[in-house]
Image (cartoon, rainbow, N blue to C red):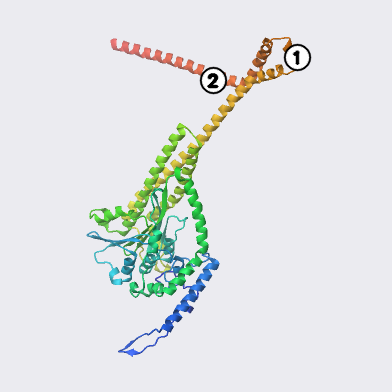
């Protein structure tokens, strides 16, 4: 198989460097002198200046390339060692809440840290090593920040394509599971309820106040120092990021403005559901990395509580794949609240429609039907992800093995116990999707019922108007005739008003039955059916009476014989 764009291909360097990266990389002159058998490297200020100039030229070339062609045709994946990766994602900054949980069947330890502390932990090899009793390490991150994600990618050798999926916050994300040689990457969409009237925290000010690790905090790691070595380079990169992202930001603001307008119009008649991506990494060494949105701090607290109890299944098994199953189960269980909210909304609208249908209820039903279709589309891939983890886990791991290593025993990422519990999660997804289908069908039926009822009412109104027109049409005709203002009207001057009714009554007796003849036939047919029904009911009652009397007589004779 061809070599992949992985960090393991060459230590300390990307397999696919940037444009002219190898040619423009600064090579300072080494002035060595022998001191007790060692060579000391001295870098002069001129060498530092030349390296800075070459770095700025390279960044300018990269920004020109991306500014001309955009992201179309760009290198897939995000490699933190590449300068272009920082140009695109260096602005992604958040104050993450990071929880580090080490546990086994005998004990568990929980710690919470900030971005700076977490980066320092991973860059220090001795501090980042797990103790001997630790079987599973769970790193739970609430928030997405470039410094945290890039440090994770470098330390745990995460695949560039998976890192790109984590950093991208597209609106068209879908649940999926990607298999890589060193880890399993799962991305699912979480559906939770939220209150639109609740005050939101302004995280922009927090992000601006975020501490950026400098060269002293990098622990001497050159992979971190290249991002924070010189303040001048940071200023240049900030300007280049604005140039690169200008086209995307304009289109994004236009879409966000239109979406905000639609959300405001739909605010009163919808179930407010927040759809956010959740990323999960499962490594071979028993490490699980979960990345949640910034406001999902309390989302994983039930699993934290289970890990602190010594007799729970997830604790006693010390199985990393069972922890992944618990996270997926947590995401699916959160969707039950969404289903209950839709159920309540459907019952409310059904009550309003049956009581008094109106156009406002139709509008709310239209919004509800659209939301149901949208959430059903985002939930269906999660069901396929769970099914694939149960059914094709080992097959997909086998597909990653080199052709010459087919004799090696291949193990899947999910254990047998995790697959058993995944079956229950799959059943929950089946129930959720079937319920959403039922709610969508009820909403469509209510819309059709309302329009049919309004159409029937309109037909009845037109029928009454037609009846009135038919009745008064002859009278109107005769009234117009007798009301004409002529001198030689013998029918007016030589007769009384009785002559008008002598003419009107026969005309009405002919015109009205001729127009209403189909209605008279339907009425006659209805009366005949009711008479036949009543006659059959009487005959049936008589036969039942005769049969009952016969059985009573027969029983009486048997008893006294």
Q: Secondary structure at mark 2?
A: helix
* In front of the other: 496 or 405: 496
In x, y percent, where is residue 237?
Answer: 46, 70
Residue 450 shown left or right of residue 490 in the figure: left
In x, y percent, where is residue 2?
Answer: 46, 69
* In front of the other: 225 or 489: 489
Residue density around tag 2, few if under 14, some if 14–19, many if 20 or more, within 10 Å: few
Where, quadrant-wise, is the C terminus in this rendering?
Answer: top left
Residue 523's quadrant in the figure?
A: top right
Residue density around tag 1, few if under 14, some if 14–19, many if 20 or more, within 10 Å: few
Residue 129 shown left or right of residue 186 in the figure: left
Numbered badge on residue 526? 2
Residue 70 shown left or right of residue 220 in the figure: right
First in residue order: circle 2 vs circle 1: 1
* In front of the other: 407 or 381: 381
Residue 474's quadrant in the figure?
A: top right
Where, quadrant-wise, is the N terminus in this rendering?
Answer: bottom left
In x, y percent, where is residue 468?
Answer: 60, 22
In the picture shown, does residue 466 fall above or below 451? above
In the picture shown, does residue 504 fall above or below 117? above
Residue 344 shown left or right of residue 103 in the figure: right
Q: Secondary structure at mark 1?
A: loop
Residue in view at x 31 percent, y 12 percent = 558
In x, y percent, where is residue 352?
Answer: 45, 35
Q: Which residue is mark 1?
A: 489
The residues tagged by marks 2 and 1 sit, at their Cα atoms, a distance apart of: 48 Å
Whether residue 4 is visible to the viewer of this picture, yes or no, is: no
């Amino acid at each position: 198989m061809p070599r992949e764009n992985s960090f393991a291909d060459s230590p300390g360097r990307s397999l696919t460097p940037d444009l002219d990266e190898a040619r423009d990389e600064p090579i300072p002159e080494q002035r060595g002198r022998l001191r007790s058998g060692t060579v000391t490297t001295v870098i002069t200020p001129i060498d530092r200046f030349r390296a800075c100039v070459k770095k700025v030229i390279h960044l300018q070339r990269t920004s020109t390339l991306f500014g001309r062609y955009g992201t179309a045709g760009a290198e897939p994946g995000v490699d933190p060692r590449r300068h272009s990766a920082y140009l695109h994602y260096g602005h992604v900054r958040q104050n993450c809440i990071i929880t580090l949980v080490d546990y086994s069947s005998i004990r568990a330890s929980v710690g919470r840290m900030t971005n700076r502390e977490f980066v320092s932990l991973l860059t220090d090899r001795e501090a980042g090593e797990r103790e001997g009793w630790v079987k599973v390490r769970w790193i739970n991150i609430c928030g997405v920040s470039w410094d945290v994600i890039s440090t994770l990618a470098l330390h745990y050798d995460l695949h560039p394509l998976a890192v790109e999926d984590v950093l991208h916050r597209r609106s068209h994300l879908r649940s999926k599971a990607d298999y890589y040689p060193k880890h399993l990457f799962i991305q699912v969409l979480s559906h939770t309820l939220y209150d639109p009237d609740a005050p939101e925290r302004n995280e922009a000010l927090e992000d601006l106040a975020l501490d950026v690790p400098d060269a002293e905090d990098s622990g001497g790691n050159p992979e971190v120092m290249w991002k924070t070595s010189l303040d001048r380079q940071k200023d240049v990169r900030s300007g280049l990021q604005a140039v690169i992202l200008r086209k995307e930001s304009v289109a994004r603001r236009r879409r966000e403005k239109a979406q905000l307008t639609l959300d405001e119009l739909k605010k009163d008649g919808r179930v407010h559901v927040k759809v956010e991506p959740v990323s999960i990494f499962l490594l071979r060494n028993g490490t699980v990395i979960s990345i949640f949105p910034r406001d999902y701090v309390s989302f994983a607290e039930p699993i934290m509580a289970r890990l602190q109890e010594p007799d729970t299944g997830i604790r006693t098994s010390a199985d990393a794949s069972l922890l992944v199953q618990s996270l997926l189960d947590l995401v699916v269980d959160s969707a039950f609240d969404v289903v209950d909210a839709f159920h309540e909304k459907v019952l409310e609208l059904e009550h309003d429609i049956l009581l008094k249908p109106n156009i406002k209820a139709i509008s709310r039903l239209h919004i509800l039907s659209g939301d149901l279709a949208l959430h059903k589309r985002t939930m269906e891939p999660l069901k396929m992800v769970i099914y694939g983890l149960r059914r094709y886990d080992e097959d997909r791991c086998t597909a990653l093995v080199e052709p010459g290593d087919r004799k090696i025993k291949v193990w899947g990422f999910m254990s047998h116990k995790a697959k058993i519990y995944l079956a229950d999660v799959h059943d929950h997804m089946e129930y959720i999707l079937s319920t959403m289908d039922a709610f969508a069908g009820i909403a469509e039926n209510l819309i059709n019922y309302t329009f049919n009822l309004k159409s029937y009412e309109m037909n009845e109104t037109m029928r009454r108007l037609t009846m009135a027109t038919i009745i008064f049409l002859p009278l109107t005709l005769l009234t117009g005739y007798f009301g004409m203002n002529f001198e030689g009207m013998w029918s007016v001057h030589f007769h009384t008003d009785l002559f008008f009714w002598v003419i009107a009554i026969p005309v009405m007796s002919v015109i009205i039955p001729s127009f209403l003849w189909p209605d008279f036939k339907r009425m006659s047919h209805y009366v005949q059916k009711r008479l036949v029904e009543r006659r059959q009911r009487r005959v049936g009652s008589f036969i039942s009476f005769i049969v009952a009397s016969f059985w009573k007589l027969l029983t009486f004779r048997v008893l006294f014989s």
